[in-house]
Image (spheres, rainbow, N blue to C red):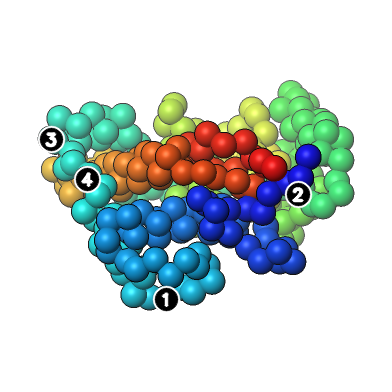
Amino acid sequence: MTTSMPSINNTQLAHPDEAVSADSLRERAYTELLRQRAVALGLLQDHGMSAFQFPDSQTQDIIEQMLEREVSTPEPDPQEQQRHYAANRHRYVIDQSLHARHILFAVTPGVNVQALANKAEGVLLSLTARDAAPDGFARAAAEYSNCPSSQQGGDLGWITPQECAPELAQAFFWDSAGMMPPGLHPRLVHSRFGLHIVEVLASNQGRQLTFEEVQERVAMTLQVQSRSTALRQYMMILAGEADVRGVEIEGADSPLVQG
């Protein structure tokens, strides 16, 4: 089977000898779908060249204006805003902070993750034992932790959600059960950095903001979500109507490679 060059409706997305990553190819495909839609609506002239070959700010401006006209995003109603607030109250709290310490088992290139997890679990179990030494956490941090805080017994000081990676903020502050309570957390915490043994030394619960205080913020959040969903559906429709070859994009009916 002869493979086809990546194209949208026979307009190529790359030069024959060009190496393009899958992500870049998808980006070009979506841009080309939008360019061709603008041509079909009479907003752009068709020069027979794809958008990646002659990118210009004027074309981008016209495409953005087209999207504003073609993709409608309804305003979230008060009931929808109230539902979102009720389901995400934990995200509308100010002045939250934790005093915590941790032991980081970093996941680095080439590391055996399963062996690392087993080691971390073993250290956690030893710290939860009844006969665990009072200074056991600090000594374990000094021996095992791959974080500079290991020199301070793993002490991170007082931290806020804004100072954490999103996945750690979720575990520390925004879990469905509420903020992580004081004491040694019974499970490993996973993050982009690796595996953490965490002990909360003290916490400040902060203040719950009322719906009235955050209504504009809630409305903006819902608008962004609605806009993202609408744009995704719009692009799926364009892809479904196009002859897509050599690139995989959502909504396209064509096989990944036709030839």
| CA distance separating discs 3 and 4 | 19 Å
Asked which secondary structure carries label 4, the reply is loop
Instruction: Tell me residue 24's x, y (percent).
Output: 60, 59
Residue count near mark 2 (Cα–Cα under 10 Å), binned few <14, some 14–19, many ≥20: some
The tag earlier along the polypeptide, 3 or 4, is: 4
Q: Which residue is mark 3?
A: 78
| CA distance separating discs 4 and 2 | 45 Å
| CA distance separating discs 3 and 1 | 41 Å
Instruction: Tell me residue 69's x, y (percent).
Output: 21, 53
Judged left or right of residue 45, residue 166 is right
Residue type of the residue flagged with mark 3: Pro
| CA distance separating discs 1 and 2 | 44 Å
Asked which secondary structure carries label 3, the reply is helix
Query: Does the CB distance between marks 1 and 4 fall below 8 Å?
Result: no
Residue at point 49%, 74% (across, down): 54
Q: Which residue is mark 2?
A: 106
Frontmost of labels 3 and 4 is 4
Given residues 41 and 205, the one toward you in this image is 41
| CA distance separating discs 2 and 3 | 45 Å
What is the quadrant of the C terminus in the image?
A: top right
Instruction: Tell me residue 93's x, y (percent).
Output: 31, 44
